[in-house]
Amino acid sequence: MRWLLVLLGIVAMIVQGQLWFSTSGFGKTRDLRAAVAEQTARNELLRERNLALDAEVINLKQSSEAAEERARTDLGMIGPNETFYQVVPASD
């Protein structure tokens, strides 16, 4: 009976050793949890960015003023009754 307990103790130690020190044991689980947490944080940032872009798309679809403002800032649009002046800095 004593040998059976010793044998079971040795088997338990081997199983614990594999759990803690093998490449597919506790260390890998810890690394995977950290990777999941990092990806979740990255996804949250992208979700916020997507919500902002969705709001901008809705605004552009519903308002011609928003589209005109976007065209002015991004594309340099000039209205039909406007005059364009370009200021060139003086060279030294």
Image (tube, helix red, strand yellow):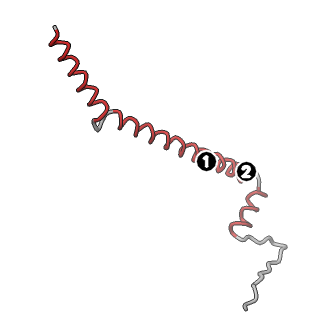
Q: How far apart, in angstroms, are the residues tagged by discs 2 and 1?
A: 14 Å
Q: Amino acid at mark 1?
A: Asn
Q: Is 62 left, or right, of 28 in this rendering?
A: right
The relative height of residue 72 versus residue 62 in the rendered view (above or below) is below
- Residue placed at 35% from the left, 33% from the top? 26
Give the residue drawn at x 14%, y 13%: 3
Q: Secondary structure at mark 1?
A: helix
Give neighbour class at mark 2: few <14, some 14-19, many 20+ (Cα, 10 Å): some
- The residue tagged 2 is 59
29 on left or right of 88: left
State the image quarter where residue 17 is shown: top left
Q: Which mark is residue 50?
A: 1
The N terminus sits in image quarter: top left
Which one is earlier in the sequence, the residue at label 2 or at label 1?
1
Does residue 20 lie above or below 73 as drawn?
above
**Mark sitting on residue 72:** none
When asked about the image quadrant of residue 86, the answer is bottom right
Nearest the viewer among 63 and 43 is 43
State the image coordinates of residue 44 (x, y, percent, origin top left).
57, 43
Amino acid type of disc 2? Asn
Residue 45 percent location from the top left of the image: 58, 46
